[in-house]
Image (cartoon, grey):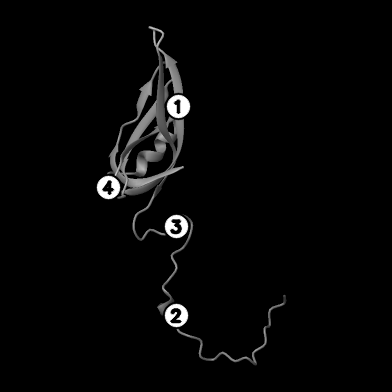
Amino acid sequence: MEVQGKIKLVGETQTFGSNGFRKREVVVITEEQYPQTIMVEFVQDKTDLLNNFNVGQNVKISINLRGREWVNPQGETKYFNSIQGWRIENLQEGAPAAGMPPVPPADQFEPASDFSDDDHDDLPF
């Protein structure tokens, strides 16, 4: 699943417990008829993915939904949900797709004027 929107906040990396569990949160606002403010958490080594992102950038975040059950000391069962990110991509206007060179507009090429149907294909295959 994916969430797209503009970054509103990039949190600091937090460390918890003696085992060094790390978590970092990012908040995005979706751009739709009824915009939603969505908090996505990145955990452990994925926290570093947020290092190159700033407030105001348009991004696409690949997410997983996580849910868990917890029984409090009084014996009551509680349920929690979280949205966990595992990839984030910049959707900045005009940025080329990752790994793809920009394609020049078609009007930058001159039409072939010396083309003839009599020309034979000299390719060896």
Which quarter of the rendered picture does the C terminus lie within? bottom right
Earlier residue among tags 2 and 4: 4
Circle 3: residue type: Ala
* C-alpha gap between disc 1 and disc 3: 33 Å
Q: Quadrant of residue 76?
A: top left
Q: Position of residue 85 (x, y in %)?
A: 43, 37
In this rendering, does residue 115 appear at all? yes
Q: Position of residue 75 (x, y in %)?
A: 41, 8
Q: Residue at x 33, y 38 (%)?
A: 38
Q: Could you say whether the residue bearing mark 3 is in a helix, strand or loop?
A: loop
Q: Position of residue 91 (x, y in %)?
A: 37, 52
Q: Which mark is residue 56?
A: 4
* C-alpha gap between disc 1 and disc 2: 54 Å
What is the count of numbered marks? 4
* C-alpha gap between disc 3 and disc 2: 22 Å
Q: Mark 3 = which residue?
A: 97
Q: Position of residue 2 (x, y in %)?
A: 43, 44
Q: Mark 2 = which residue?
A: 109
Circle 2: residue type: Phe
Q: Could you say whether the residue bearing mark 1 is in a helix, strand or loop?
A: strand
